[in-house]
Image (cartoon, rainbow, N blue to C red):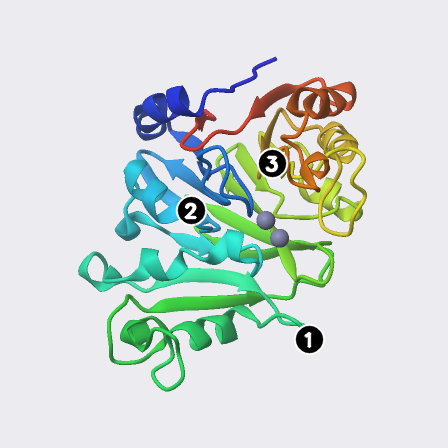
Amino acid sequence: MLLCLGAVEAADAGQDICRDAPVAVQVLGSGGPFPRDGRASSSYLVWIDGRARLLVDAGGGAFVRFGEAGARIEDLSLLAISHFHPDHVSDVPALLWVSQLFRTAPLPFVGPSANDAFPAVDTFLDRLFGDGSGAFPILSGTVGGGNSGVALDVTTVDATRGDPAIVFDTAELRVTAQGVPHANVPSLAYRAEVGDASVVFSSDQTGADPGFVEFARDATVLVMHFAVAEATDGPLHARPSIVGQIARDAGVDTLVLSHLSGLDPAHPRYGDFSLADQAANVSIVREAFDGNLVLAGDLLCLPIE
Ligand SMILES: [Zn+2]
Ligand SMILES: [Zn+2]
């Protein structure tokens, strides 16, 4: 059992480990929507041969962590967004600002389809960066306009689909996506395959769809969001017992608990979240899953091969 608790130590160690490993996964943001514990919101990298190739999510703080990690926009093969809650996507404009200075090749960008409450990824980007009505028309180069920003090559994935969609496929890296249940929010899990290594990013989800167990089957690393306490049975997040059961049933080697969430003890909802009694919540995961267990910290790097 491996249990990593120190975000600061992980930050110091993470950079060289990720650059030196053939394949590595790095946590840029191990938190969720609350500005607590020095954690950035959700964001992850997959490193291949010393370069950060895949960025999954870019919540608040990801911009800073991306630079601290030594990642470069010109090295990215794909930027994948799980869903449009701000703790997963709010730093996208910061990451793309003046990106045309660093790369000319279009940047593949993937995200979910729309429903009545949320835009599809192409609409989301047009509303942010469009020449006419965007909030940041200065970045219209990202969506085919004449201003700043590297062009984005956008792929929309139907978030209602229950089987994997191939969203990126080269000799070096293969990425698939599949819809997961997260209240009324179109939400995508991603699976990255590099040689024999596989890393699955759960996105925010309840864990109620058994199809996700198949999606995560035999993954080398499963990064699963661990937001709520066991007594919290809402429509947004998987309880610790469900997180443990999914990791066990999928047969993953290493489970990384991330999207760690906590409030001030004086807050009336303090007890609802995973950090309120972290040890008890982690032990509930451990009851089901006996593989490697890692508690995420910002900049934590896990070499895979
Ligand atoms: Zn979230
Ligand atoms: Zn969410």
Label 3 C-beta lies within 8 Å of the nearest ligand 1 atom: no
**The residue positioned farthest toward the front in the image shown:** 266
Q: Secondary structure at mark 3?
A: loop
Q: Secondary structure at mark 1?
A: loop
**Amino acid type for the residue under numbered disc 1:** Asp
**Apparent side of residue 11 relative to residue 218 in the rendered image (left or right):** left
Q: Quadrant for the C terminus, please.
A: top left
- Image point (33%, 34%), residue name: 49
- Image point (64%, 48%), residue name: 204
| Front position in the image: 13 or 55 | 13
**Amino acid type for the residue under numbered disc 3:** Gly
On screen, residue 305 above or below 264: above
Kindly identify which residue carries mark 3: 262
Query: Can you give x and y, in whole percent of width and height, for residue 142 in the image?
Result: 33, 70
Query: Can you give x and y, in whole percent of width and height, for residue 32 in the image?
Result: 55, 44
Q: State the separation of the CA atoms marked 3 and 2.
A: 28 Å
Say which of marks 1 and 3 sits in front: 3
Mark 3 touches mark 2? (CB < 8 Å): no
